[in-house]
Amino acid sequence: MWVERWTSPTGTRRFLTKLGSSEADLYRRVTGLALPHPPRAIRSFGCERPPRRRAWPDERAAWRRAMRLALDGADVALASDVAACYPSIGERAIRMASTWAGGDPDPLLAFLERAHEVGAAGLPIGPVPSSTIADAVLAIADRQVGAAGLPPVRWVDDVVFAGSRGEVARAARAWRVALHDLGLHEHEGKRRTVDVRGTVPAPSLAARPERVIMRSS
C-alpha cells in the first residue's frame, strides 16, 4: 500500500492510494463486513454499489432523468457539495453507516488505520470500496433531509435541491445539520443557487446545475 500525489487536468491535487491485489481483496472484504446491507438513497448516483455496478453511460442517463424530474416545476435549485468528502469521512461516520447496515465496522477501521499510517486521510482515494462507503455515509444524510421533505439529487458528494424557495431553504439547513452529525461539512464556497422557473426551457434545465455540481470532487 502506498500513496501517490496526482494532479487533475484542472489543477486539483489529490493523494491517491494504491493497493496490492491482496490489500484490494482485504479492503473489499472488510467493507462488506461493515456494510452488509448499506443504506442507500433512491436519488444518489455515481457511486459503486455492490453486487453490481451500472454501466457508466446508464448511470449518467439515470442521473440526468432524476435531475429533470426534480427541476420540473421547481422555482429554484441549490447546488452544493461536501468539503473534502473522502478525507473527512472518519470513524464516527463509518460507525453510523455500519450501524444502519447491521455490520461490524472494526475490521474496516483497522484497515483504514493502516492506510492512514502510509499517508491516506479518511477514505483512501482511488480504491473502489471507498466509493461504496462514501455512498453509505451520505445516504444517511440523504434520508434525514428526505424526512424534512426534499431529498437531494446526489452525484457522489455533489447535491442539488430543487423546489420552492422555502422547501429548498429547509432542505439546505437539514443537509448541513445531517453532515455535521456525520462529522462532515458543506463546502460553502461551492454553494450556488439557480433561479429555475421561467428562465430556461424545461429540456435544458439539467445542464445548468450540472455545470455547477460536476466540477467538484
Image: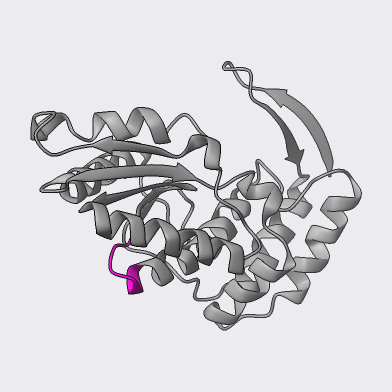
Residue 128 lies in the magenta stretch:
no
Residue name at image x 64 percent, y 73 percent: 34
| Direction from residue 20 to residue 75 in the image, left or right | left
Examine the rendered structure and indicate whether residue 180 appears above or below residue 154. below
Residue 158: x and y in percent read 45, 44
Residue 99: x and y in percent read 59, 81
| Direction from residue 16 to residue 180 in the image, left or right | left
Name the one closer to the observer, 1 or 171. Answer: 171
Residue 161: x and y in percent read 32, 51
Q: For the view shown, which residue lies furthest in the front direction?
A: 166
- Residue 217 visible in the picture: no
Residue name at image x 42 percent, y 67 percent: 40
The kind of secondary structure the magenta stretch mainly shows is loop
Query: Quadrant of the rendered structure where residue 64 is?
Result: top left
Q: Which residues are magenta?
A: 146-151
Q: Quadrant of the C terminus?
A: top right
Name the one closer to the observer, 49 or 120. Answer: 120
- Residue 29 visible in the picture: yes
